[in-house]
Amino acid sequence: MSYDLLFNRPLVEKYDRPGPRYTSYPTVPQFHAAFAEDDYRAAAERSNQAANPKPLSVYVHIPFCRSLCYYCACNKIITHNTERAAEYLDWLKREIEVQGALFGDTRRMTQLHLGGGTPTYLSNAQLGELMAALDTAFHFAPPEEREFSLEVDPRTVTPEQIHELRELGFNRLSFGVQDFDPDVQRAVNRVQSEEQVVALVAAAREAGFDSVSVDLIYGLPLQTVASFDATLDKIISLRPDRIAAYSYAHLPELFKAQRLIRREDMPPPERKLELLELTIKRLSDAGYVYIGMDHFALPEDELSLARDNGTLQRNFQGYSTHADCDLIGLGITAIGKVGDTYSQNVKDTAEYQARLESGRLAVMRGYRLNDDDRLRRDVINELMCHGHIDFATIEARHGIVFRDYFAEALDKLTEPRTDGLIELRDNTLTVLPAGRLMMRNLAMAFDAYLTPGQQRFSRTV
């Protein structure tokens, strides 16, 4: 698709406002402490008793980093004391054992993602321990059915270690590059050379990884159109299978690390749109497919194929090719989705350890969906993953009359329809090319909990 069909500057400026990312519905602000450990255990039991229990997906949060990236809004622990990570790994293995006991022996784990922090803060030997514990508790699916990925800080691994990661069972890597420009790197305290990244991507290819992804961020301090164009040149020459280009949300009042960025180094708001336009144009011209929500993939990549054949999924890690799974979150702050519930673990290591030491789960809060939530989640997923809602399909699944039930939502979409973001017919709603960048805005019309100004969200474009 030509970039000029996707990027319409006046429309992008008009709809660039705060809104949820819809990695879940309801979104995290609706989670509450009344959802307790017993609720989670009951959800796991209901999931096991289902006629066709879902496969398992596991997210593991590794919070440790050796240095602070000033832009980062993730939950992290900055330390050079590797003993803390070794102790955390011991507690992770305890949680894995406790969680594994909740799910049936016949269920198989098809998906794994290690996020952070910096997952490669752990040594490969420690990652091997973690993988062995996961396999014992959750029973890995055969290699051809797995999607096992981890985020890699290029400053923390060697090409030899990349080969070892493949031997441990990982088949997808995501390299955090952000920007190659030395001035930008210094401004955010994340200095890494182009040569490091090139060598690691080559090693991943040699080792036989199924997919190599690269993360970029636009809107960082000191970025210019020319400097980011040079970064895109280098990324395109590497030809990663997937590219995630995230918009930087500068919220120093919420995230202390961002206060270390000099205000005078921040690009003006119009620069971000210039960088977004540049990114879409360069990647489209290079043959990448815009999947949605910051994600691009080569036409032959599984994400592109899933988007084309209608099997694309969305979860807390973003877009996925795997069928809907029960997602088990492990580690501090990790979020899970089991059956008709969401859950989140405690936020600090002391409480995490105390919970597990007493034989309890680390679940701190969560949410159980009601019928209206399930209906709206279904609609939002159809919109975000497929760009199309077939009213008859939703009506058959949920026993409603779509236009009656969602009369208010459809009314909210009058302006986007007039602006050419969507096409609304008698029985279908289709996102037009100009509306694909504004997918979050369109989903907001179906959100029953959204109150303008009540929650702080990143901007939608």
Image (cartoon, rainbow, N blue to C red):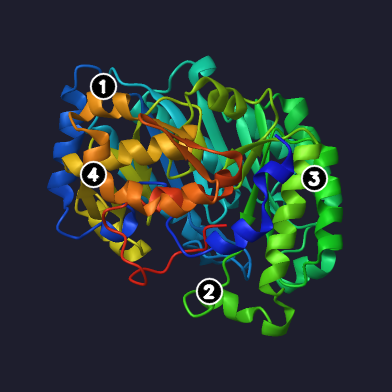
Nearer-N-terminus badge (3/4)? 3
Nearer-N-terminus badge (3/2)? 2
Q: Residues within 10 Å of mark 1 (few under 14, many from 20)?
A: some
Whether residue 409 sits left or right of residue 268 in the image: it is: left
The label on residue 373 is 4
Q: Can residue 112 be seen from the camera position used here?
A: no
The label on residue 53 is 1
Relative height, residue 322 to residue 237 (above, below): above
SS at mark 1? Answer: loop
- Given contact means CB atoms under 8 Å apart, are the residues at marks 2 and 1 in contact? no
Q: Label 4 is placed on what type of residue?
A: Asp
- Given contact means CB atoms under 8 Å apart, are the residues at marks 3 and 2 in contact? no
- Given contact means CB atoms under 8 Å apart, are the residues at marks 4 and 1 in contact? no
Nearer-N-terminus badge (4/1)? 1
Relative height, residue 340 to residue 83 (above, below): above
User: Can you identify the residue that label 3 sits on?
Assistant: 282
Q: Label 2 is placed on what type of residue?
A: Leu
Residue 277: % across, % down: 73, 54
Q: Nearer the viewer, mark 2 or mark 1?
A: 2
- Given contact means CB atoms under 8 Å apart, are the residues at marks 4 and 2 in contact? no
What is the CA distance from the residue labelled 4 to the residue labelled 1? 21 Å
Whether residue 89 sits left or right of residue 308 in the image: it is: left
Q: Nearer the viewer, residue 155 or 241?
A: 241
Q: Nearer the viewer, residue 382 or 88?
A: 382
Q: Residues within 10 Å of mark 4 (few under 14, many from 20)?
A: some
Q: Label 1 is placed on what type of residue?
A: Pro
User: Can you identify the residue that label 2 sits on?
Assistant: 251
SS at mark 2? Answer: loop
What is the CA distance from the residue labelled 3 to the residue labelled 4? 39 Å
Q: Nearer the viewer, mark 4 or mark 2?
A: 4
What is the CA distance from the residue labelled 4 to the residue labelled 2? 30 Å
